[in-house]
């Protein structure tokens, strides 16, 4: 691996911008919204039965767009019931955006919000040290298990916090996605940061099986338009390259043979498909629902 290659996570502003380009180029959020609209109501149908308050824990809640969409479905299912929504999010920037979104959103009167600026591991250590282990009716972890060092221990801990009829929803890239093929083939040649690990739904379901925890898994097709990655010097393409490889300035620092290999593979059917002149990377998401 060339010494000039470094992890995308070493440059926070570059990471934020490449992630923004990924969201703009992909159907990630539309895919999540489709799941929340069509599947979630059935999943949460029993979480609040006979309860005067529904307790929801959001791990890695980000800027809150998906969280508020989830909360609207819980409100529709349990009209008038008080909801206690706690958010664990390590980024102060994201928490600020989340609070701004709450401030300008109507119909949140029956929801109490609390934010904790910490990682899931810091949250776990804090509540265990203070012996403040409370039960939750719904816990969701959306696209955040990549940033956890010990995933089985994390799953076991949060599973132990589930109340009667409660659920955990976790979202990860699917084992059938292009990410799975990309990471398996090239992960060892890319500068992986210890802040992040390559994990897909196939790995997660294996861990849940080993723990003896019951779950259901739903896959929904999502795509990312990577056409710009094949235009030399294209700014959007360069930022998408960074996101795909988790490498800062991949286009200018990667060995030419490595970039050429990945570029060739990205056009193969197991990674992407072509539609209306565009190259669409397989960003299929898995929604894994864990039962109490």
Image: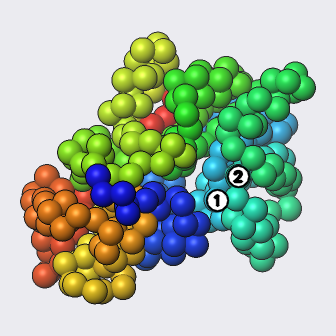
User: 188 or 47: nearer the eye?
Assistant: 188
SS for tag 2? Answer: loop
Residue at image coords 84%, 37%? 52
Residue at image coords 75%, 46%? 118
The tag earlier along the polypeptide, 1 or 2, is 1
User: 273 or 250: nearer the eye?
Assistant: 250
Say whether marks 1 and 2 touch (CB < 8 Å): yes
Residue extending furthest toward the front: 3
Residue ID for mark 1: 62
* Colour mapping used in the image: rainbow
Which image quadrant for residue 104? Answer: bottom right
Which image quadrant for residue 101? Answer: bottom right
Q: Position of residue 132 (x, y in %)?
A: 87, 27
Residue at image coords 80%, 49%? 116
Local crowd size for mark 1, using a 10 Å CA cut-off: few (<14), some (14–19), many (≥20): many
Side (left or right) of 19 relative to 157: left
Numbered marks: total: 2
Which image quadrant for residue 47? Answer: top right
3D distance between C-alphas at marks 1 and 2? 6 Å
User: 23 or 257: nearer the eye?
Assistant: 257
Side (left or right) of 52 relative to 26: right
Q: Is residue 123 visible?
A: yes
SS for tag 1? Answer: loop
Q: Position of residue 120 (x, y in %)?
A: 67, 39
Q: Is residue 219 visible?
A: no
Q: Position of residue 130 (x, y in %)?
A: 90, 26
Local crowd size for mark 2, using a 10 Å CA cut-off: few (<14), some (14–19), many (≥20): many
* Picture disc at residue 89: 2
Q: Quadrant of the C terminus?
A: top right
């Amino acid at each position: 691996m060339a010494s000039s290659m470094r992890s995308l996570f070493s440059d926070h502003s570059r990471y934020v911008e490449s992630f923004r380009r990924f969201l703009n180029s992909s159907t990630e959020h539309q895919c999540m919204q489709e799941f929340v609209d069509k599947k979630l109501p059935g999943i949460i149908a029993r979480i609040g039965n006979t309860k005067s308050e529904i307790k929801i824990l959001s791990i890695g809640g980000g800027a809150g767009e998906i969280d508020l969409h989830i909360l609207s479905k819980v409100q529709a299912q349990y009209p008038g019931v008080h909801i206690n929504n706690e958010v664990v999010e390590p980024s102060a920037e994201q928490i600020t955006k989340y609070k701004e979104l709450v401030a300008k959103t109507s119909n949140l009167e029956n929801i109490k919000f609390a934010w904790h600026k910490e990682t899931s591991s810091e949250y776990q250590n804090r509540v265990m040290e203070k012996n403040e282990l409370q039960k939750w009716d719904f816990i969701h972890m959306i696209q955040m298990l990549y940033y956890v060092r010990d995933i089985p221990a994390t799953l076991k801990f949060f599973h132990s916090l589930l109340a009667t009829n409660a659920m955990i929803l976790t979202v990860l890239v699917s084992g059938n996605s292009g990410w799975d093929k990309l990471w398996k083939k090239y992960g060892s040649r890319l500068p992986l940061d210890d802040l992040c690990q390559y994990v897909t739904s196939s790995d997660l379901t294996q861990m849940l099986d080993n723990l003896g925890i019951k779950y259901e898994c739903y896959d929904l097709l999502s795509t990312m338009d990577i056409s710009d990655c094949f235009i030399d010097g294209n700014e959007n393409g360069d930022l998408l390259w960074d996101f795909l490889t988790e490498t800062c300035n991949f286009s200018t620092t990667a060995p030419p043979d490595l970039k050429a290999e990945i570029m060739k593979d990205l056009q193969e059917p197991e990674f992407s498909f072509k539609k209306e002149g565009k190259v669409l990377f397989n960003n299929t998401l898995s929604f894994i629902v864990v039962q109490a």
